[in-house]
Image (cartoon, rainbow, N blue to C red):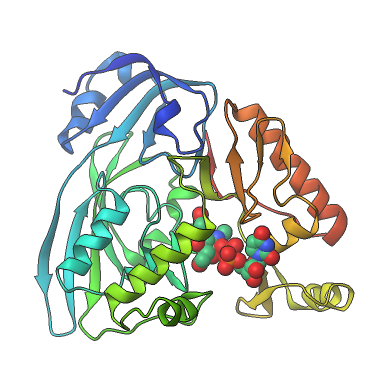
């Protein structure tokens, strides 16, 4: 059974850098650790939470119960058919390192998701995405371990019920599973996705090759310019989802705000750029206490130092209220609040 530690500081274990402590804490290094911990009656009576890279989390000052950090290692090619190569990675692997490893194996499909913070096991929970690609596009299946009884279950892609920054692990099955291993199906015929954002421009400007590695480098360059490095300034990436609204509402808004940024989102709906809404509402680069919206990307909430959950909540509400007052659009936070 893994060692269970008490009163552990989680400040450096969440990328927002919020001051937080875990009442009980253990690291999962083999899947059977879950069953072993479950068998302990005192631990079994506590509430359990799973911690990955801590890059999409808003922590309270005290995390009661047991916080489990997933440290399951491993990455390997597990199979191949006519059309694709199948690769598996442990839930504790660092996402970016895994993506770079697939590229080094000559495999493509994950390059647009380079430099996203966090772990492989956390990636399916919010269906991470960037530059026109989401984890759901190549995820084949995953193995999860029940926090209730330690039993294992395989979730195929469809079982995960992926949506925009969403999956069954945020809703119906929230806080029930620890994701142990994820298998990706990487197609042998390479299709580069360079049409989104500044990627095409960056490939040209930096004279990068039109290969998966070239696209990965373009993504890395663009992200480094726009998004703050959590090691330097605390943040959790995009803090709000881009809101999806009916086309009719978009048209009415567009009449009033001709510069409104929106994208089609299927079935008479469209997605608005929340960063644009927040900037227009006057929050780009503005602070409230120790937190603020980032100067280079208004969608990113940053911790200027010493923030706690209450500071994040106050800013969240202030931004939501101003965007609502100006545009009549509700903003939903992207991170998970414990
Ligand atoms: N915009 C502004 N002002 C801002 C920020 C953005 O006007 O301060 C405008 C931009 O000019 C652009 C549009 O909003 O026209 C979209 O901006 P950007 O391309 O930077 O992307 P985003 O919609 O803000 C999303 C994801 C990011 C992902 C990028 C690139 C969400 C919530 N966020 O951001 O994901 O990296 O696209 O694909 O969907 C994350 O989820 O943590 C994350 C970083």
Residue drawn at x 82%, y 54% is 324
Residue 125 visible in the displayed image: yes
Residue 45 visible in the displayed image: no
Q: From this viewpoint, which residue is outermost toward the front?
A: 206
Residue 289 pos. (x, y %)? 71, 30
Residue 32 pos. (x, y %)? 16, 34
Q: Is residue 201 left or right of residue 72?
A: right
Q: Is residue 114 above or below residue 268?
A: above
Judged from the image, the quadrant occupied by ligand 1 is bottom right
Within the image, what quadrant is residue 327 found in?
A: bottom right
Q: Is residue 280 above or below residue 143?
A: below
In the depicted view, which residue is nearer to us: 42 or 113? 113
Q: Is residue 269 left or right of residue 183?
A: right
In the depicted view, which residue is nearer to us: 5 or 152? 5
Q: Is residue 121 above or below residue 233?
A: below
Residue 212 pos. (x, y %)? 29, 76
Residue drawn at x 31%, y 49% is 121
In the depicted view, which residue is nearer to us: 211 or 139? 211
Residue drawn at x 52%, y 29% is 18
Q: Is residue 273 left or right of residue 7?
A: right
């Amino acid at each position: 059974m893994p060692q269970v530690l008490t009163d552990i500081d989680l400040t450096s274990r969440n990328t927002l850098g919020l001051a937080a402590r875990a009442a009980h804490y253990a690291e999962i290094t083999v899947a059977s650790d879950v069953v072993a911990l479950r068998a302990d009656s005192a631990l079994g009576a506590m509430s359990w939470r799973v911690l990955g890279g801590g890059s999409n989390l808003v922590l309270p000052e005290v995390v009661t119960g047991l916080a489990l950090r997933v440290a399951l290692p491993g990455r390997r090619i597990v199979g191949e058919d006519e059309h694709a190569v199948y690769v598996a990675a442990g839930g504790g692997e660092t996402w970016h390192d895994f993506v770079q490893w697939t590229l080094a194996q000559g495999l493509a499909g994950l390059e647009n998701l380079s430099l996203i913070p966090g772990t492989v096991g956390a990636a399916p929970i919010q269906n991470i995405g960037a530059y026109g690609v989401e984890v759901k596009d190549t995820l084949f299946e995953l193995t999860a371990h029940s926090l209730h009884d330690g039993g294992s279950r395989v979730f195929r892609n469809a079982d995960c019920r992926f949506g925009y920054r969403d999956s069954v692990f945020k809703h119906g099955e929230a806080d029930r599973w620890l994701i142990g291993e994820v298998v990706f199906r990487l197609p042998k015929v390479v299709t580069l996705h360079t049409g989104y954002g500044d990627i095409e421009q960056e490939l040209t400007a930096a004279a990068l090759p039109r290969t998966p590695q070239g696209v990965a480098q373009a993504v890395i360059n663009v992200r480094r310019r726009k998004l703050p490095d959590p090691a330097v300034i605390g943040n959790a990436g995009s803090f709000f989802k881009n809101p999806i609204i009916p086309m009719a509402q978009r048209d009415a808004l567009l009449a009033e705000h001709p510069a409104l940024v929106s994208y089609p989102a299927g079935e008479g709906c469209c997605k608005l750029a929340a960063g644009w809404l927040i900037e227009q509402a006057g929050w780009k680069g503005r602070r409230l206490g120790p937190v603020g919206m980032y100067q280079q990307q208004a969608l990113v909430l940053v911790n200027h130092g010493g923030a706690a959950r209450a500071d994040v909540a106050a800013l969240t509400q202030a931004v939501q209220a101003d965007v609502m007052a100006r545009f009549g659009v509700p903003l939903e936070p992207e991170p998970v609040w414990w």
